Image (spheres, rainbow, N blue to C red):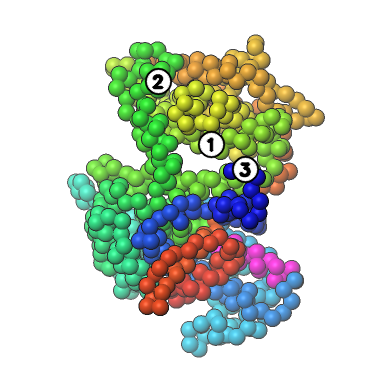
Amino acid sequence: MEGNIAGVIPAYSLFLYIMEYTLEQFADIQILRYYVPGFESLSLRQKKLVYYLSEAALQGRDILFDQNGRYNLLIRRMLEAVYLYYEGDRSTPDFQAMTLYLKRVWFSNGIHHHYGYGKFSPGFSPTFFKKALQEIDASLLSLSPGKSIEALCDEIFPVIFNPEVMSKRVNQDAGADLVLTSAANYYRGVTQQEVEAFYGAMKEPDDPTPPSYGLNSRLVKENGILKEKIWKVGGLYGAAIEKIVYWLEQAMQVADTPGQQEVIARLIAFYRTGDLRAFDAYTILWVQDLDAHVDFVNGFTETYGDALGMKASWESIVDFKDLEATRRTEIISSHAQWFEDNAPVDALFKKEKVKGISAKVITAAMLAGDLYPATAIGINLPNADWIRTKYGSKSVTISNITEAYNRAARSNGFNEEFMYGQEELTLAAKYGDLTGILHTDLHECVGHGSGKLLPGVDTDSLKAYGATVEEARADLFGLYYLGDAKLVEWGLLPDADAYKAEYYIYLMNGLLTQLVRIEPGNHVEEAHMRNRQLIARWVYEKGMPERVVELVRREGKTYIKVNNYKKLRTLFGTLLAEVQRIKSTGDYAAACGLVEHYGVKVDASLHAEVLARYRKLNLAPYKGFVNPVYEAVRDAQGNIMDVKVSYQESFTEQMLRYSRDYATLPAEND
Ligand code: ZN
């Protein structure tokens, strides 16, 4: 119905109306909010499941702080105590700088940058901080008995203020002792050589099912003897893990399927024993559990935080299937043979029988540990090679996180700066999000799986150019079909103009704006970026006689203008035919020619122009999220009658609440 007036606006549109995606910006960080569409439609049992798993997720927060550095929890608590209880002037540069530093510590789960690993330099003085600590009630710091503020400052200040002390969380400089020079809290008093010898001795060369040795422990030397302190109930981080287990036990009662119940039981068994074979048993069930609507990751998972790549940081995500998006990929996948048969490539290179992949798309309901506040937009687990080979892996993309990134980007001035005019801006605003997602779906569900090698052609014949050619093939497959009327017929696109949005955005990115990710003086190295430039440059050059795509200069700035979208589609098809021929025949010389000529070199003056325009927008390079808040509505007997989700909390409110309600560990964990 049209013409709604205030009183009769349906609840959902009112909800859309007030949705805000960008919350605040500080240092090199932008804080966003994500929403959880579909939560209200879950059954009460599933809402409880999400709630219990979310509690299990939040209980692990302190583990990650301690893993990222042995003084992180103590420093966080010192900063929070001053932030909350300082009675002096809060408008001074010192207090403001301390607040900024605290926000960065919250964001990075420690005193080092979450991505670059370098230690933050505090903009406030040690004198200010010491005085502030002395003025607040000392009991707020829960110091060990007999320890004075004076002694605390002597111990901790070098860690905060001296740039030489614990300067990098993860050091990967060749030649250094990676263990001794990394501040991460995975080892104490041992050298890299000792670590390698210790775990080297555990490995059995012929074991077809090797456990992930070292995954869940800190390796220490005590009285000259190396030993593992296992992270488990009754072991290191036991207090936090007990709480995680408690909430997992609640979740088990309301699991989605008997299979999932067993998955959770195995995870609890692993947390209780710390036995890595139990971890593998859990993982094998988890990866095969595809029926449950609500799913989760909870545990010691990724090893990027350990310079030796053995110790896993703690993380959690709670999610459920995005049925709408999954329906979309199922439609694409069910027409895989139609795509193959109608592709504009030589019949010799087509598969007689092709099977599409239905991409799994999920909605995140809670992010925690190493997935919070900064997070990934996709997850591919488990990491153990032998389990992946034997049982497969779960590979998912997270739709509501992608949505939040897209929405946040709408209002940041980027499109206004780089798009040619109002027509392009309107196209992008109207269709850009949808066509971007659909292009990715086509790329993943049918693009990579299309085509075949001629008999006798080595899969490796394109060598270093193989990855770029393969990405170009999948991208071109998607681009070509985005402009096909069938997509409108199948209900995947709203009308025959929609595809133009992705065509424009793709060319603008490949010819112009992806250059913002390259340092001045460098060329394009990364395979996906090379592929995008290759495609954009090629169609630009081949379409020149008919001015299909133009580079227009206006007031010292360069813009992309597409004059003929239909012809552009034909050019994508022509290049797809050539790229498929190169792949199918293993034509190394042609691959080299194509990639080197179109995909690698950067025009220095255009590059400088793009960087200058981008810098003026003052965008934060890193983004992270505030979680929704779940509240259990209980009856007089304490039974949960409903779970409400809300989205009002600010970044600071959320961090302070987590520090108060989920403080599971002491400041020092030895
Ligand atoms: Zn790909």
Q: Quadrant of residue 600?
A: top right
Q: Mark 2 and mark 1: span between their CA atoms?
A: 30 Å
> For the magenta stretch, what is the residue range?
92-108
**Could you tell whether 207 is left or right of 335 in the image?**
left
Q: Quadrant of the N terminus?
A: top right
Q: Amino acid at mark 3?
A: Glu
Q: Amino acid at mark 2?
A: Lys
The foreground one among 270 and 204 is 270
Check contact, mark 3 vs mark 2: CB within 8 A. no
Is 96 within the magenta? yes
Few, some or many C-alpha atoms within 10 Å of disc 3 (few <14, some 14-19, many ≥20)?
A: few
Q: Residue 244 versus residue 303: which sits nearer the camera? A: 244
Q: Which mark is residue 434?
A: 1
Query: Circle 2 is placed at which residue position?
Result: 583
Label 3 beta carbon less than 8 Å to ligand 1: no
Residue at figure coordinates x 37%, y 78% from the top left: 637
Is disc 2 surrounded by few (<14), some (14 to 19) or many (20+) residues within 10 Å?
A: many
* Residue 63 x/y as whole percent: 43, 66
Q: Is residue 76 left or right of residue 454?
A: right
| Residue 601 lies in the magenta-colored region | no
Q: Residue furthest right?
A: 555
Give the distance between the C-alpha atoms of the residues marked 3 and 2, in whole angstroms.
Answer: 53 Å
Sequence order check, earlier mark of 2 and 1: 1
- Residue at mark 1 to residue at mark 3: CA–CA distance: 24 Å
